[in-house]
């Protein structure tokens, strides 16, 4: 769910304020709520709460914080934009930063004219008060009104670009030693140095009035320089100890081509180092509000755990009908399609042959359905569709269902025998006994299709426990036929996950990467083991995701992308389908 947790408040927090009856008590309660949230570690907050706090800080334009502290201690947002190299650890410092022992961090808030950062993904540091409460205090050495990257040999740990006056530690700023005490004075000096960003003085980040002057000075620069952020230099952290950095969130900037995958890589790096999931915020710069930060649970790399839990719950739910008397596939079971991974097509698009016969075959997995295999080759991938009642842009239509392999690739409109276009109930097959008698006198390709109503669909599930003969290959799975959907509408489809079967992780990653490239959105790769114990049929492993890799996934080659057989992959073909089910 997307939470645009703006300065007006998120639903999460506003619900806590519903019973406030006066403006004065509202102010008091808001202060108490925010104070309580600031005191909590980031992993104790919801992602929506983190987005709310970051938006609150961005909108705050205080001159100073409590006890005459500089404004960065409680307002504005400290953002570390990173180059975007897939292999770069988020805690890495540049050669210049390692030499100066100062990390360069952007400072943004709504009363500045900042409209973008150097790059479009990175992490957000907690404000000074929160960082101190976490036991990870920030030491901000100085503040530059205009974005700059100090050279490695810049004096005073990067704070003295002018190198004209000695600093007075612990305050390493250079404006005061150069006789500059306010924004107009800074502007005069800056203009006298040719408005060269590498010839500006830095303001104190310790003295509240001086830090506010750095913000006022930003307002005086030309329109060409104003879109960039103010910069602060923070005492460098140890890149080998990312857990010591007070990271409050990771971000990607959708207004400047920000990449979700890069933010997920940083999120996983942090998890690997700390065991804690820190939220990813989707943000963007734009008039009139400046920057807005939001939280979407489907952007998070740990969303896969929630998806796997949903799948296992639906798998375990064996209710014969759904609310309103609708068939079970509306609310339970798991609808799975095995598909090849290829650079020649998008796996979620119906194939030309499926379109031609008006049916895309899936398997329907449920605890009582006894599906023991999805393919009979080693390794494979595909995808899972949400239950039919789930909200979606393009609802899917189930056409028919078969208890076994239905040989759908050779059927008329994927459901009917070429000689008989009736559903089972139209042929009097409405009981297990009637179905057994029918099944023994037909072949896989001529058995009757079950109608997608509640009673017929449930009978097709029960029939799987009463096969009158043995066919280990073709009885291992069933077939659910869905009417083809239009090409190239991935965001409108009820796609829930990509799957890996046996050795199928490389192919599944390719589908995940293709989907992310086409949509900008994340769907998890889920391991599927049809014979696993209850609760373990669907498993999420963060290391299976492309965010765990440092390089893009290449298109799969070889047998694993094409060898799997079965109706849920290709439609059926071959001599077995011509045999009678009783043979």
Image: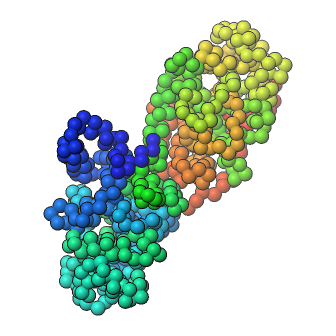
Q: Report x, y in % for residue 468.
A: 68, 15
Question: At 68% across and 30% down in the image, what residue appears?
Answer: 482
Question: At 37% across and 56% down in the image, what residue appears?
Answer: 249
Query: In the depicted view, which residue is nearer to us: 383 or 502?
Result: 383
Is 70 situated left or right of 410 in this image? left
Q: Residue furthest bottom?
A: 164
Is 360 situated left or right of 207 in this image? right
Give the color scheme: rainbow, by chain, secondary structure or one colour.
rainbow
Confirm whether residue 530 shows in the render: no
Query: In the depicted view, which residue is nearer to us: 114 or 52?
Result: 114
Confirm whether residue 418 shows in the render: yes
Q: Residue furthest left?
A: 67
Query: In the depicted view, which residue is nearer to us: 237 or 407?
Result: 237
Quarter holding the N terminus? top left
Q: Report x, y in % for residue 265.
A: 47, 57
Q: How many marks?
A: 0
Query: In the depicted view, which residue is nearer to us: 41 or 232?
Result: 232
Quarter holding the C terminus? top right
Is 376 situated left or right of 92 in this image? right
Answer above or below: position of 477 versus 285.
Answer: above
The image quarter in which residue 232 lies: bottom left
Q: Report x, y in % for residue 502.
A: 58, 42
Question: At 69% across and 53% down in the image, what residue appears?
Answer: 343
Question: At 54% across and 45% down in the image, what residue appears?
Answer: 523
Q: Report x, y in % for residue 539.
A: 48, 39
The image quarter in which residue 176 lies: bottom left
């Amino acid at each position: 769910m997307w939470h645009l947790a703006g300065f007006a408040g998120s639903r999460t927090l506003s619900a806590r304020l519903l019973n406030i009856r006066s403006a004065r008590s509202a102010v008091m309660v808001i202060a108490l709520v925010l104070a309580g949230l600031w005191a909590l570690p980031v992993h104790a907050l919801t992602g929506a709460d983190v987005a709310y706090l970051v938006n609150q800080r961005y909108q705050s334009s205080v001159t100073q914080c409590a006890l005459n502290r500089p404004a960065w201690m409680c307002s504005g947002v400290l953002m570390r934009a990173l180059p975007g190299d897939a292999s770069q650890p988020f805690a890495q410092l540049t050669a210049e930063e390692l030499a100066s022992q100062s990390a360069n961090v952007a400072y943004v808030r709504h009363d500045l004219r900042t409209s973008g950062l150097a790059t479009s993904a990175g992490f957000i540091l907690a404000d000074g008060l929160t960082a101190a409460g976490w036991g990870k205090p920030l030491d901000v050495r100085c503040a530059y009104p205009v974005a700059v990257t100090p050279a490695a040999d810049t004096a005073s740990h990067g704070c003295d670009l002018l190198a004209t006056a000695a600093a007075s530690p612990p305050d390493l700023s250079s404006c005061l030693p150069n006789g500059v005490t306010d924004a107009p004075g800074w502007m005069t000096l800056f203009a006298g140095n040719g408005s060269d960003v590498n010839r500006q003085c830095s303001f104190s980040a310790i003295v509240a009035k001086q830090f506010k002057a750095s913000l006022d000075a930003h307002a005086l620069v030309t329109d060409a320089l104003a879109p960039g952020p103010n910069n602060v230099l923070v005492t460098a952290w140890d890149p080998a100890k990312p857990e010591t950095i007070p990271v409050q969130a990771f971000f990607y900037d959708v207004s400047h081509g920000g990449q979700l995958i890069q933010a997920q890589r940083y999120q996983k790096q942090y998890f690997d180092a700390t065991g804690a999931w820190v939220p990813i915020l989707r943000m963007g710069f734009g008039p009139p509000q400046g920057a807005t930060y939001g939280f979407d649970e489907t952007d998070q790399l740990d969303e896969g755990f929630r998806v796997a839990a949903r799948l296992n719950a639906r798998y375990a739910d064996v209710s014969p009908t759904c609310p309103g008397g609708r068939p079970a596939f509306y609310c339970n079971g798991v609808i799975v399609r095995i598909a090849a991974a290829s650079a020649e097509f998008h796996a979620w698009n119906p194939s030309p042959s499926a379109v031609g016969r008006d049916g895309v075959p899936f398997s329907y997995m449920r605890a009582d359905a006894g599906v023991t295999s999805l393919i009979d080759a080693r390794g494979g991938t595909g995808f899972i569709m949400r239950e039919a009642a789930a909200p979606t842009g393009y609802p899917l239509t189930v056409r028919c269902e078969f208890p076994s392999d239905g040989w759908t690739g050779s059927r008329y409109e994927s459901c009917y025998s070429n000689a008989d276009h009736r559903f089972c109930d139209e042929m009097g097959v409405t009981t297990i006994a009637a179905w057994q008698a029918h099944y023994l006198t037909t072949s896989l390709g001529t058995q009757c299709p079950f109608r997608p109503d509640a009673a017929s669909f449930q009978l097709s599930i029960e029939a799987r426990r009463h096969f009158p003969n043995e066919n280990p290959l073709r009885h291992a799975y069933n077939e659910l036929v869905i009417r083809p959907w239009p090409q190239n509408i991935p965001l409108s489809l009820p796609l829930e996950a990509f799957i890996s079967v046996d050795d199928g992780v490389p192919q599944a990653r390719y589908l995940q990467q293709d989907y992310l490239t086409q949509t900008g959105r994340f769907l998890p790769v889920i391991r599927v083991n049809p014979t696993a114990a209850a609760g373990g049929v669907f498993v999420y492993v963060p290391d299976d995701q492309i965010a765990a890799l440092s390089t893009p996934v290449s298109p799969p080659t070889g047998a694993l992308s094409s060898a799997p057989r079965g109706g849920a992959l290709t439609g059926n073909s071959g001599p077995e389908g011509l045999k009678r089910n009783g043979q």
